[in-house]
Image: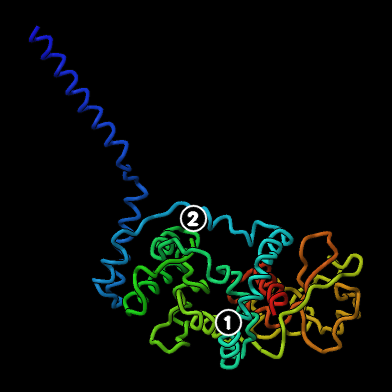
Amino acid sequence: MAIGKLNLFVAIYFGMSFFSLQTNAQDTPAVTTEDTAFNLWLDGVRTEALERGISQATLDVALADVKLIVRVIKRDRNQPEVKQPYQQYLKSRVSPWRKEKGAKMVLEHGQSLNAVAERYGVQGRFVAAIWGIETNYGTVPLSYSVFDAVATLAYDKRRAARFRRELFAALAILDSGETTMEKMKGSWAGAMGQPQFMPENYLKYAQDFDGDGSKDIWDSKEDVFASIANYLKAYGWRDDQTWGRKVTLPAGGEKKLVGKQADGLAPDRICKPFKSMGVWRDLQEWQTLGVRRLNGGDLPPRSIAAALIIGDEGDGEGYLVYRNFCSVMRYNPSFKYALAVGLLSDEIK
Protein backbone atom coordinates (compact mmCIF):
# COMPACT_ATOMS: atom_id res chain seq x y z
CA MET A 1 0.00 0.00 0.00
CA ALA A 2 2.83 2.36 0.87
CA ILE A 3 4.57 1.48 -2.39
CA GLY A 4 1.34 2.12 -4.28
CA LYS A 5 0.95 5.51 -2.64
CA LEU A 6 4.60 6.30 -3.37
CA ASN A 7 4.16 5.36 -7.01
CA LEU A 8 1.02 7.50 -7.19
CA PHE A 9 2.88 10.41 -5.59
CA VAL A 10 5.79 10.03 -8.03
CA ALA A 11 3.43 9.86 -10.98
CA ILE A 12 1.54 12.95 -9.83
CA TYR A 13 4.75 14.85 -9.06
CA PHE A 14 6.43 14.13 -12.36
CA GLY A 15 3.18 14.61 -14.22
CA MET A 16 2.78 18.06 -12.65
CA SER A 17 6.42 18.82 -13.36
CA PHE A 18 5.97 17.82 -17.00
CA PHE A 19 2.81 19.91 -17.24
CA SER A 20 4.68 22.85 -15.71
CA LEU A 21 7.48 22.49 -18.23
CA GLN A 22 4.98 22.29 -21.07
CA THR A 23 3.15 25.38 -19.81
CA ASN A 24 6.38 27.36 -19.45
CA ALA A 25 7.45 26.31 -22.92
CA GLN A 26 4.17 27.56 -24.32
CA ASP A 27 4.32 30.84 -22.38
CA THR A 28 7.88 31.61 -23.47
CA PRO A 29 8.00 32.87 -27.05
CA ALA A 30 10.28 30.77 -29.22
CA VAL A 31 13.33 32.52 -30.62
CA THR A 32 12.99 32.23 -34.38
CA THR A 33 15.69 32.21 -37.02
CA GLU A 34 14.43 35.64 -38.06
CA ASP A 35 14.84 36.98 -34.53
CA THR A 36 18.40 35.70 -34.44
CA ALA A 37 19.18 37.30 -37.79
CA PHE A 38 17.60 40.58 -36.66
CA ASN A 39 19.70 40.62 -33.46
CA LEU A 40 22.87 39.99 -35.44
CA TRP A 41 21.90 42.81 -37.76
CA LEU A 42 21.37 45.07 -34.73
CA ASP A 43 24.91 44.33 -33.58
CA GLY A 44 26.11 45.85 -36.84
CA VAL A 45 23.90 48.90 -36.25
CA ARG A 46 25.40 49.40 -32.79
CA THR A 47 28.93 49.20 -34.17
CA GLU A 48 28.22 51.72 -36.91
CA ALA A 49 26.37 54.04 -34.51
CA LEU A 50 29.39 54.17 -32.22
CA GLU A 51 31.57 54.98 -35.21
CA ARG A 52 29.17 57.82 -36.04
CA GLY A 53 29.63 59.28 -32.57
CA ILE A 54 26.42 58.07 -30.92
CA SER A 55 27.06 57.44 -27.23
CA GLN A 56 26.92 53.98 -25.70
CA ALA A 57 24.43 55.30 -23.14
CA THR A 58 22.02 56.32 -25.92
CA LEU A 59 22.36 52.93 -27.62
CA ASP A 60 21.70 51.16 -24.33
CA VAL A 61 18.45 53.08 -23.93
CA ALA A 62 17.25 53.16 -27.54
CA LEU A 63 18.10 49.64 -28.68
CA ALA A 64 17.85 47.62 -25.47
CA ASP A 65 14.36 46.34 -26.19
CA VAL A 66 14.00 47.10 -29.89
CA LYS A 67 11.81 44.55 -31.69
CA LEU A 68 11.14 43.32 -35.21
CA ILE A 69 7.44 44.05 -35.82
CA VAL A 70 5.89 41.97 -38.59
CA ARG A 71 2.73 44.09 -38.80
CA VAL A 72 4.87 47.13 -39.69
CA ILE A 73 6.15 45.31 -42.77
CA LYS A 74 2.58 44.27 -43.66
CA ARG A 75 1.38 47.87 -43.41
CA ASP A 76 4.28 49.04 -45.53
CA ARG A 77 3.03 46.70 -48.27
CA ASN A 78 -0.58 47.92 -48.07
CA GLN A 79 -0.57 51.70 -47.84
CA PRO A 80 -3.96 53.36 -48.48
CA GLU A 81 -2.43 55.92 -50.87
CA VAL A 82 -1.77 52.98 -53.20
CA LYS A 83 -4.70 50.67 -52.49
CA GLN A 84 -7.73 52.98 -52.14
CA PRO A 85 -9.58 54.65 -55.05
CA TYR A 86 -9.51 58.46 -55.11
CA GLN A 87 -13.12 58.90 -54.03
CA GLN A 88 -12.78 56.54 -51.07
CA TYR A 89 -9.45 57.98 -49.96
CA LEU A 90 -10.54 61.62 -50.20
CA LYS A 91 -13.92 61.03 -48.59
CA SER A 92 -12.33 59.45 -45.54
CA ARG A 93 -9.68 62.15 -45.14
CA VAL A 94 -11.76 65.21 -45.96
CA SER A 95 -14.54 64.03 -43.70
CA PRO A 96 -17.28 66.20 -42.16
CA TRP A 97 -15.65 65.77 -38.73
CA ARG A 98 -12.23 66.82 -40.01
CA LYS A 99 -13.67 69.86 -41.79
CA GLU A 100 -15.66 70.98 -38.75
CA LYS A 101 -12.81 70.34 -36.34
CA GLY A 102 -10.35 72.06 -38.67
CA ALA A 103 -12.43 75.22 -38.88
CA LYS A 104 -12.52 75.33 -35.06
CA MET A 105 -8.77 74.75 -34.82
CA VAL A 106 -8.03 77.57 -37.27
CA LEU A 107 -10.05 79.93 -35.08
CA GLU A 108 -8.68 78.63 -31.79
CA HIS A 109 -5.05 78.80 -32.91
CA GLY A 110 -5.43 81.71 -35.29
CA GLN A 111 -2.85 83.91 -33.56
CA SER A 112 -0.14 81.24 -33.71
CA LEU A 113 -1.00 80.25 -37.27
CA ASN A 114 -0.90 83.88 -38.40
CA ALA A 115 2.46 84.42 -36.72
CA VAL A 116 3.85 81.34 -38.44
CA ALA A 117 2.37 82.43 -41.78
CA GLU A 118 4.03 85.82 -41.47
CA ARG A 119 7.46 84.37 -40.67
CA TYR A 120 7.51 81.49 -43.15
CA GLY A 121 5.23 82.69 -45.94
CA VAL A 122 2.87 79.70 -45.76
CA GLN A 123 -0.87 80.29 -45.31
CA GLY A 124 -2.13 78.98 -41.99
CA ARG A 125 -4.95 76.96 -43.52
CA PHE A 126 -2.46 74.70 -45.30
CA VAL A 127 -0.46 74.20 -42.12
CA ALA A 128 -3.68 73.30 -40.29
CA ALA A 129 -4.77 70.96 -43.10
CA ILE A 130 -1.54 68.95 -42.93
CA TRP A 131 -1.86 68.85 -39.14
CA GLY A 132 -5.41 67.55 -39.55
CA ILE A 133 -4.60 64.92 -42.16
CA GLU A 134 -1.54 63.66 -40.27
CA THR A 135 -2.85 63.31 -36.71
CA ASN A 136 -6.41 64.64 -36.59
CA TYR A 137 -5.13 67.94 -35.16
CA GLY A 138 -2.91 66.20 -32.65
CA THR A 139 -5.52 63.79 -31.28
CA VAL A 140 -4.28 60.52 -32.81
CA PRO A 141 -2.35 58.49 -30.20
CA LEU A 142 1.22 57.73 -31.23
CA SER A 143 1.76 54.20 -30.02
CA TYR A 144 4.73 52.81 -31.94
CA SER A 145 8.28 53.13 -30.68
CA VAL A 146 10.12 55.06 -33.37
CA PHE A 147 13.09 52.74 -32.92
CA ASP A 148 10.99 49.59 -33.36
CA ALA A 149 9.40 51.00 -36.51
CA VAL A 150 12.47 52.33 -38.31
CA ALA A 151 14.64 49.38 -37.25
CA THR A 152 12.06 46.96 -38.65
CA LEU A 153 11.91 48.81 -41.97
CA ALA A 154 15.69 49.19 -42.08
CA TYR A 155 16.04 45.43 -41.61
CA ASP A 156 13.40 44.73 -44.26
CA LYS A 157 14.84 44.65 -47.78
CA ARG A 158 12.28 46.84 -49.59
CA ARG A 159 13.52 50.25 -48.38
CA ALA A 160 16.45 49.20 -46.23
CA ALA A 161 18.92 51.96 -47.18
CA ARG A 162 16.41 54.77 -46.62
CA PHE A 163 15.28 53.50 -43.21
CA ARG A 164 18.80 52.74 -42.05
CA ARG A 165 19.43 56.48 -42.43
CA GLU A 166 16.23 57.16 -40.47
CA LEU A 167 17.40 54.86 -37.69
CA PHE A 168 20.68 56.71 -37.29
CA ALA A 169 18.83 60.03 -37.43
CA ALA A 170 16.51 58.86 -34.63
CA LEU A 171 19.53 57.85 -32.56
CA ALA A 172 21.12 61.26 -33.20
CA ILE A 173 17.94 63.03 -32.00
CA LEU A 174 17.89 61.09 -28.74
CA ASP A 175 21.65 61.47 -28.31
CA SER A 176 21.40 65.26 -28.68
CA GLY A 177 19.09 65.53 -25.68
CA GLU A 178 16.48 67.25 -27.86
CA THR A 179 13.79 64.91 -26.53
CA THR A 180 13.34 61.83 -24.35
CA MET A 181 12.93 58.15 -25.06
CA GLU A 182 9.38 58.36 -23.77
CA LYS A 183 8.50 60.93 -26.43
CA MET A 184 10.05 58.98 -29.29
CA LYS A 185 6.66 57.65 -30.34
CA GLY A 186 5.19 57.77 -33.78
CA SER A 187 3.40 55.94 -36.56
CA TRP A 188 4.05 52.44 -37.86
CA ALA A 189 6.54 54.00 -40.31
CA GLY A 190 8.42 55.92 -37.61
CA ALA A 191 6.90 59.33 -38.41
CA MET A 192 7.09 61.39 -35.24
CA GLY A 193 4.88 63.82 -33.39
CA GLN A 194 1.86 65.82 -34.49
CA PRO A 195 3.26 66.78 -37.92
CA GLN A 196 4.52 63.22 -38.48
CA PHE A 197 8.11 64.09 -39.34
CA MET A 198 10.49 61.30 -40.17
CA PRO A 199 13.68 61.51 -38.06
CA GLU A 200 15.81 62.87 -40.93
CA ASN A 201 13.25 65.59 -41.61
CA TYR A 202 13.11 66.46 -37.93
CA LEU A 203 16.84 67.16 -38.01
CA LYS A 204 16.44 69.31 -41.14
CA TYR A 205 13.19 71.20 -40.61
CA ALA A 206 11.87 71.07 -37.02
CA GLN A 207 11.58 74.51 -35.41
CA ASP A 208 11.59 75.93 -31.89
CA PHE A 209 8.96 78.62 -32.47
CA ASP A 210 7.89 79.03 -28.85
CA GLY A 211 11.48 79.76 -27.80
CA ASP A 212 11.77 77.23 -24.99
CA GLY A 213 14.98 75.70 -26.36
CA SER A 214 13.36 72.51 -27.66
CA LYS A 215 11.94 71.61 -31.08
CA ASP A 216 8.92 69.94 -29.53
CA ILE A 217 6.75 68.55 -32.32
CA TRP A 218 4.92 66.35 -29.80
CA ASP A 219 3.40 68.86 -27.39
CA SER A 220 4.05 72.44 -28.57
CA LYS A 221 1.47 73.65 -31.08
CA GLU A 222 3.70 76.60 -32.02
CA ASP A 223 6.60 74.28 -32.82
CA VAL A 224 4.28 71.94 -34.75
CA PHE A 225 2.92 74.77 -36.93
CA ALA A 226 6.32 76.33 -37.54
CA SER A 227 7.91 72.99 -38.41
CA ILE A 228 5.23 72.21 -41.02
CA ALA A 229 5.53 75.69 -42.51
CA ASN A 230 9.32 75.54 -42.56
CA TYR A 231 9.13 72.22 -44.40
CA LEU A 232 6.84 73.61 -47.10
CA LYS A 233 8.92 76.77 -47.41
CA ALA A 234 12.05 74.68 -47.93
CA TYR A 235 10.33 73.10 -50.92
CA GLY A 236 9.38 76.30 -52.69
CA TRP A 237 5.98 77.22 -51.26
CA ARG A 238 4.54 80.53 -52.52
CA ASP A 239 1.90 82.31 -50.48
CA ASP A 240 0.61 84.24 -53.48
CA GLN A 241 -0.83 81.02 -54.91
CA THR A 242 -3.17 78.26 -53.81
CA TRP A 243 -2.82 74.52 -54.47
CA GLY A 244 -5.23 74.09 -57.39
CA ARG A 245 -8.90 73.21 -57.87
CA LYS A 246 -11.27 70.39 -58.73
CA VAL A 247 -12.58 70.61 -62.31
CA THR A 248 -14.86 68.93 -64.83
CA LEU A 249 -13.48 67.51 -68.05
CA PRO A 250 -14.86 67.54 -71.60
CA ALA A 251 -16.11 64.27 -73.09
CA GLY A 252 -13.20 61.90 -73.50
CA GLY A 253 -10.95 64.24 -71.55
CA GLU A 254 -9.64 61.50 -69.28
CA LYS A 255 -7.71 60.14 -72.25
CA LYS A 256 -7.23 62.94 -74.75
CA LEU A 257 -5.98 65.53 -72.24
CA VAL A 258 -3.24 63.30 -70.88
CA GLY A 259 0.32 64.09 -71.96
CA LYS A 260 3.95 63.73 -71.03
CA GLN A 261 5.83 66.34 -69.06
CA ALA A 262 8.04 67.05 -72.09
CA ASP A 263 4.97 67.89 -74.23
CA GLY A 264 4.08 71.14 -72.45
CA LEU A 265 5.47 73.99 -70.38
CA ALA A 266 8.66 73.41 -68.42
CA PRO A 267 7.44 72.79 -64.85
CA ASP A 268 8.79 74.59 -61.81
CA ARG A 269 11.96 72.99 -60.43
CA ILE A 270 9.98 71.80 -57.41
CA CYS A 271 7.61 69.92 -59.73
CA LYS A 272 10.08 68.61 -62.30
CA PRO A 273 10.90 65.37 -60.41
CA PHE A 274 7.22 64.35 -60.47
CA LYS A 275 7.07 63.28 -64.11
CA SER A 276 3.93 61.20 -63.52
CA MET A 277 2.00 64.47 -63.14
CA GLY A 278 2.19 64.64 -66.91
CA VAL A 279 1.93 67.69 -69.12
CA TRP A 280 1.93 71.26 -67.76
CA ARG A 281 -0.13 73.87 -69.61
CA ASP A 282 -1.17 77.43 -69.01
CA LEU A 283 -4.49 77.72 -67.21
CA GLN A 284 -5.94 79.48 -70.25
CA GLU A 285 -4.91 76.60 -72.52
CA TRP A 286 -6.76 74.20 -70.24
CA GLN A 287 -9.75 76.52 -70.64
CA THR A 288 -9.47 76.29 -74.43
CA LEU A 289 -9.30 72.49 -74.19
CA GLY A 290 -12.67 72.45 -72.40
CA VAL A 291 -11.70 72.11 -68.73
CA ARG A 292 -14.13 73.99 -66.48
CA ARG A 293 -14.90 74.73 -62.83
CA LEU A 294 -17.13 72.22 -61.04
CA ASN A 295 -20.13 74.52 -61.55
CA GLY A 296 -19.46 74.66 -65.27
CA GLY A 297 -18.03 78.18 -65.18
CA ASP A 298 -14.83 79.37 -66.78
CA LEU A 299 -11.46 78.89 -65.14
CA PRO A 300 -9.91 81.95 -63.45
CA PRO A 301 -8.63 84.47 -66.05
CA ARG A 302 -5.05 84.10 -64.86
CA SER A 303 -1.94 82.88 -66.61
CA ILE A 304 -0.44 80.17 -64.41
CA ALA A 305 1.12 76.78 -65.15
CA ALA A 306 -1.07 73.85 -64.13
CA ALA A 307 -1.02 70.07 -64.43
CA LEU A 308 -4.09 67.85 -64.66
CA ILE A 309 -4.50 65.02 -62.16
CA ILE A 310 -7.06 62.45 -63.29
CA GLY A 311 -8.90 60.77 -60.43
CA ASP A 312 -11.06 57.67 -60.68
CA GLU A 313 -11.74 56.53 -64.21
CA GLY A 314 -15.14 57.39 -65.62
CA ASP A 315 -16.23 60.15 -63.24
CA GLY A 316 -15.49 62.97 -65.72
CA GLU A 317 -13.60 64.95 -63.09
CA GLY A 318 -10.03 65.89 -62.38
CA TYR A 319 -7.86 68.38 -60.54
CA LEU A 320 -5.85 71.24 -61.98
CA VAL A 321 -2.89 71.71 -59.65
CA TYR A 322 -0.23 74.41 -59.34
CA ARG A 323 3.32 74.49 -58.07
CA ASN A 324 2.31 74.51 -54.36
CA PHE A 325 0.80 71.08 -54.92
CA CYS A 326 4.33 69.83 -55.56
CA SER A 327 5.49 71.30 -52.24
CA VAL A 328 2.85 69.18 -50.49
CA MET A 329 3.99 66.19 -52.56
CA ARG A 330 7.41 66.64 -50.96
CA TYR A 331 5.70 66.10 -47.61
CA ASN A 332 4.13 62.88 -48.88
CA PRO A 333 4.71 61.86 -52.52
CA SER A 334 1.14 60.80 -53.22
CA PHE A 335 -1.37 62.57 -55.48
CA LYS A 336 -4.19 61.47 -53.19
CA TYR A 337 -2.49 62.79 -50.07
CA ALA A 338 -1.69 66.18 -51.62
CA LEU A 339 -5.24 66.48 -52.95
CA ALA A 340 -6.64 65.71 -49.49
CA VAL A 341 -4.52 68.49 -47.99
CA GLY A 342 -5.62 70.95 -50.66
CA LEU A 343 -9.30 70.12 -50.46
CA LEU A 344 -9.30 70.22 -46.65
CA SER A 345 -7.51 73.59 -46.66
CA ASP A 346 -10.34 74.99 -48.82
CA GLU A 347 -12.92 73.82 -46.30
CA ILE A 348 -11.32 75.17 -43.12
CA LYS A 349 -10.12 78.59 -44.23
Q: Helix, strand, or loop for circle 1?
A: loop
Q: Identify whether 4 is placed above or below 319.
A: above
Tag of residue 73: 2
Q: Amino acid at mark 1?
A: His
Q: Identify whether 21 is placed above or below 115.
A: above
Q: Residues within 10 Å of mark 1 (few under 14, many from 20)?
A: some
Q: Helix, strand, or loop for circle 2?
A: helix
Q: Identify whether 195 is placed above or below 188.
A: below
Q: Quadrant of residue 230?
A: bottom right
Tag of residue 136: none
Quarter holding the C terminus is: bottom right
Residue at image coords 47%, 82%: 206
Residue at image coords 72%, 73%: 343
Residue at image coords 57%, 91%: 115
Q: From the viewer's perspective, is 290 left or right of 170?
A: right
CA gap, disc 2 and disc 1: 37 Å
Q: Quadrant of residue 318?
A: bottom right
Look at discs 2 and 1 and give the one toward the viewer: 1
Q: Nearer the viewer, residue 121 or 30?
A: 121
Tell me residue 114's x, y (percent).
Answer: 60, 89
Q: Nearer the viewer, residue 38 or 318?
A: 318
Q: Amino acid at mark 2?
A: Ile
Q: From the viewer's perspective, is 165 left or right of 241?
A: left
Residue at image coords 62%, 87%: 122
Tell me residue 96's x, y (percent).
Answer: 70, 65
Q: Nearer the viewer, residue 341 or 44?
A: 341
Report the label total: 2
Task: Specify which label sits upstream in the sequence, 2 or 1.
Answer: 2
Residue at mark 1: 109
